Image: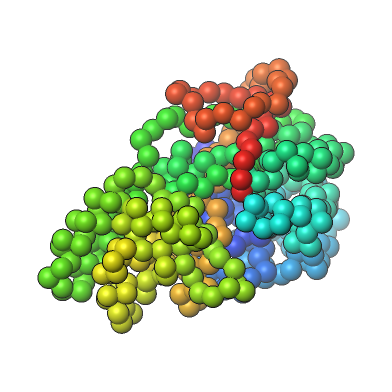
Amino acid sequence: MNSTERRFTSVEICAGAGGQAVGLHDALFKHLALIEVDPHACATLRKNVEGNSEWQGCEVIEADLTKLDLAALKDRLRRQLGLSDEEDVTGKLDLLAGGVPCPPFSVAGKQLGQDDERDLFPTMINMVRELRPNAVMIENVRGLLDQKFEPYRQRILQDLEALGYRKCLWKVLEAKDYGVPQLRPRAILVAMTEKYAEHFTWLDPEKLPITTVAQALEGSMRQRFNAVNDPRADDAFKRWYGEASKDVAPTVVGGSKKHGGADLGPTRAKKAWRDLGVCGLGVANDPEEMKDKERDLFAPAGPKLTVGQAAIIQGFPETWQFVGKKTAAYRQVGNAFPPPVAQAVGERIIAALEATNTGASAGQPDGPFEVPGPSVSARPEFRDCRGDFEGAGIG
């Protein structure tokens, strides 16, 4: 496949502000639909997708998944795929992807799992049953792989197997291993129909130097300090850069709609941000809208991040625009899936789809479930799709 050809199609649910969509787009999937319930996130998706020739044919559907008209969606997909009204969509869609809600499995909540009304795994399974894509990709917090949820995980796998899918990957991936300047472990499930699953192999990332907060934000932070024309700016920037060069950021969180405005997380996260020279007690206004430089740039704990800078920490390209007021925009960023991680998974899915078409050799024999180990190995390692179920710990 050349650098611009998009032969493999996808539909994404719980698309949010587009983190997973951007990553899969960069992996060269052609999105047919992005489905999301939040109006602010839908506005962001439309802002970036509609009228963009690279996303031609992609429709943003604002809908509650639990009330989504699947018959209408299938009709829409038939038109997009060039099928007749009588043709079935089975096997015609390459990927159904989504980051189903995390609160049912996150240690930050009550971990009610399947008893949480926000659990959309059953809805996702039903969409797989109706659309029958060649591959399924589901992202969630690493808490889903805790021991307490093992029976539920087995139920999910049994439901997928009953529909003809084989587990290819269920593993915690750490964002910092993919060049994202942030600690953000996420549990990724990939399942494919039999003829594609045998060609799926997972390539762990090479152990590369991390991208620090300073490296990621140097340009934008220097621009912010230079814009205020304050004699303290140069020293403040140097002080920030020295602190921010120490490490990657803690996990960026979106926060709750029920509790106040935007900030950079709970007490532990705020302390980690302060150690990196960043004040986590709020989010800064964009430079052109800044009214209080003492609050946004010269706070004792250091400068606050803008929404755009938080997006860089998530791995978004700087060209991706977020719609809504500051708090709403920041929450979209904080709830996103880092695009580089989605891209890495998407590329392995495409490799399996392509290998099937070219008749490449299958993967290795079945292996046992693995005990969680380090997030990366010292060198690239191929793991068979049938023996990869890693990860445990907090979400």
Say if 154 sits above or below 320 in the image: above
Q: Residue furthest top?
A: 365
Residue at 41% in and 53% down: 272
Residue at 26% in and 69% down: 298
Say if 283 sits above or below 360 in the image: below
Examine the rendering and report whether any part of residue 94 can be seen: no
Give the color scheme: rainbow, by chain, secondary structure or one colour: rainbow
Residue 118 horizontal side relative to residue 140, left or right? right
Q: Position of residue 323 (x, y in %)?
A: 49, 73
Residue at 41% in and 63% down: 280
Q: Quadrant of residue 206?
A: top left
Q: Position of residue 293 (x, y in %)?
A: 27, 76
Residue 372 horizontal side relative to residue 374, left or right? right
Say if 157 sits above or below 244 in the image: above
Q: Nearer the viewer, residue 315 or 151?
A: 151
Q: Nearer the viewer, residue 95 or 167?
A: 167
Q: Position of residue 91 (x, y in %)?
A: 77, 43
Examine the rendering and report whether any part of residue 71 can be seen: yes
Q: Nearer the viewer, residue 193 or 179?
A: 179
Q: Position of residue 352 (x, y in %)?
A: 63, 32
Q: Residue furthest left?
A: 231
Residue at 47% in and 46% down: 183
Label count reads 0
Residue 349 horizontal side relative to residue 73, left or right? left
